[in-house]
Amino acid sequence: MSSRGTLRSGVQSKVMATAGRKAGSLMVEVYRAARFTVLAAAFAAGCAGGPESAPDVRVTVTRRLMGMPWSITVHAASPAAGHAAIAAGFAEVARLERVLSDYDPDSELSRLSAQAPMGAAVAVSEDLWRVLHRAADLQADTDGAFDITVGPLTSLWRQARRTGVAPGTDRLAAARHAVGRQALELDADRRTVRLIQPGMRLDPGGIGAGYAADRAMEVLERRGIAAALIDASGDVLVSAAPPGAAGWRIAVAPAGTSAEDHVMLVHAAITTSGDAYQAVEIGSQRHGHVIDPRTGQAVPGPAAVTVIAPDCTTADALATAALVLGPEAGLRAVAGRPGCAARFTWKDGGAVRTAVTRSWPGVTADR
């Protein structure tokens, strides 16, 4: 997951959740070094209501989890109820970070990767099982463009970014040997996982944050929160519309311009995968930060894909897969899934081009 909007350089992006002052003041801004902007705005006209209106307080809290900023916005009966629900949501994300992190050597996922040389079947928690099972389905559905076993290749390219030296053919070939669906064995009856190839490493990027957002939303709902927005640094998940509003108005906006394209969402997720900012020049070649698991090569770009889906797990993974597949195949992969839509933006010479699936909702431009 990376950034939001158009393909301009040298612009700091902003993820902003805003609400009109008359409906209860809120403005939380999270700045990230990226070239895209996503604005998530809930316009709750008439929230103030009359004397018979149910109490409605909008609360937003921002925290850093999974190595990035998260914000949760809720509509609650009182400030105390809102803060308590948000605290429970963040606690769920923190718990899942201890399960899914590939940076924490003590996480459940890291401990599983450490057992790869032994090739033993390992019993895993329900959460890790659900992520791996979902990842396996998405790997099959995208012809390998999304692959949670891409970790060995991710490690090589992270090193390349630090050293400025692209990985050699031999090293890429060795890493690719430990990547692919054939290297991961899942036993649903026993809920065990076996990493078959030595050197395997699981990489939850492209699915972990989305899964955590989905689970956090479930926690909010159990706390009686009907209207909420979770923003995991641009992976945005919304539930029911705020009181008095038709939905959550999400703006995918070109950074540094006055134009904003909006979509209105309820009970849906929207996320963007892009490589405009995090690309690195090695020699004369441009290398993005997203890796094609099938070839071992970094996606050259620059490009960005925004995906709408019923849940954040799906939106997160499909955005990554579509970026790897490219405009035509990427949009086709999204278009065939119920409740999903996508917009692909890429640079073609000096021009910026955009294509959308037929399911992409109507947008308006504010100028």
Image (spheres, helix red, strand yellow):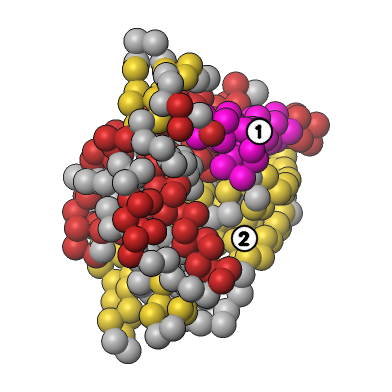
Amino acid under disc 2: Met
Give the residues drawn in magenta, as a range.
85-113
Mark 1, Cα crowd under 10 Å, few <14 / some 14-19 / many 20+, is few
Q: Is residue 344 above or below residue 222?
A: below
Measuring 23% from the left and 40% from the top, which residue is drawn there? 141
Q: Who is closer to the viewer here, 44 or 238? A: 238
Q: From the viewer's perspective, is the residue at label 1 or at label 2 nearer?
A: 1
Could you say which quadrant of the image residue 193 lies in?
Answer: top left
Q: Main secondary structure of the magenta part?
A: helix
The image position of residue 216, as x and y in percent, is 58, 32
Give the percent coordinates (x, y) of residue 10: 56, 82
Q: Looking at the image, which residue is at 75% across and 30% down? A: 84
- Judge left or right: residue 105 versus residue 179: right
- Look at the numbered discs 1 and 2 and tell me whether their residues touch, using CB distance below 8 Å: no
Image coords of residue 132 (percent x, y): 41, 31
The residue that disc 2 covers is 16
Residue linked to disc 1: 106
Secondary structure of the residue carrying tag 1 is loop
